[in-house]
Image: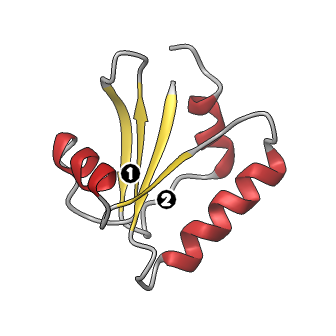
Amino acid sequence: MKVLVLYQPRSEHRIVIEELVHEYKRLYPGSTLEVLDVDQPDGIAMAKLYGVMRYPSLLVLSEDGSLIQHWEGDDALPRLDEINYYASSNL
C-alpha cells in the first residue's frame, strides 16, 4: 500500500499538512507518506488520474495503483493511526 498526500504548499492548509506529515514521521519512523504538490506536474497528474476535487487529499493506493480509500478537504483528514493502518497494510 501507498499513502499519497496531495496539497498546495502555498495555501492555508499548508501548516495542517506539514504538521500531519511531521507528526506521522515522528510516531511511525519506519513508514512513509508520499507528499506531492498539486501545482507541480506529478501532483497535477495524480489529482487528475484519481479525480481529486478538494485539497488537501490523502489517497490510499494498492500496489497496482487502484484507489482503496481517500479523504478530501482539511475537514475530513483521518487520524494518524488510521493512515498508518493503510500505510503498513498489505490489503
- In percent of width and height, residue 71 lies at 38, 51
Q: Residue at x 67, y 69 (%)?
A: 19
* Secondary structure of residue under mark 2: loop
Identify the residue at image location x=39%, y=71%.
8
Is 58 left, or right, of 43 in this rendering?
A: right
The foreground one among 44 and 71 is: 44
Q: Residue 89's x, y, as percent?
A: 60, 21
Residue 24's x, y, as percent? 71, 52
Is 63 placed above or below 69 here? above
* Circle nearer the N terminus (1, 2): 1
Q: Quadrant of residue 50?
A: top left
Drawn side of residue 15 relative to residue 52, left or right:
right
**Residue 49: which quarter of the image?**
top left
Give SS at disc 1: strand
> Residue at left 79%, top 34%?
30
Q: How many marks?
A: 2
Horizontal side of residue 44 vs 83, given as left or right: left
Question: What colour scheme has been applied to the protein in the rendered image?
Answer: secondary structure
Which residue corresponds to the image point at 59% horizontal and 42% vertical from the top-left? 83
Q: Which residue is mark 2?
A: 77
Q: Residues within 10 Å of mark 1 (few under 14, many from 20)?
A: some
Residue under numbered circle 1: 71
Q: Amino acid at mark 2?
A: Leu
Residue type at mark 1 is Trp
**Callout 2 crowding tier (Cα within 10 Å): few <14, some 14–19, many ≥20:** some
Q: Quadrant of residue 9?
A: bottom left
Q: Give the Cα separation between the discs numbered 1 and 2.
A: 6 Å
Q: Which mark is residue 56?
A: none
Residue 15 in percent (x, y) is at 58, 78
Q: In the rendered image of this protein, does residue 11 appear above or below residue 21?
A: below
Mark 1 and mark 2 residues within 8 Å of each other at the beta carbon = yes
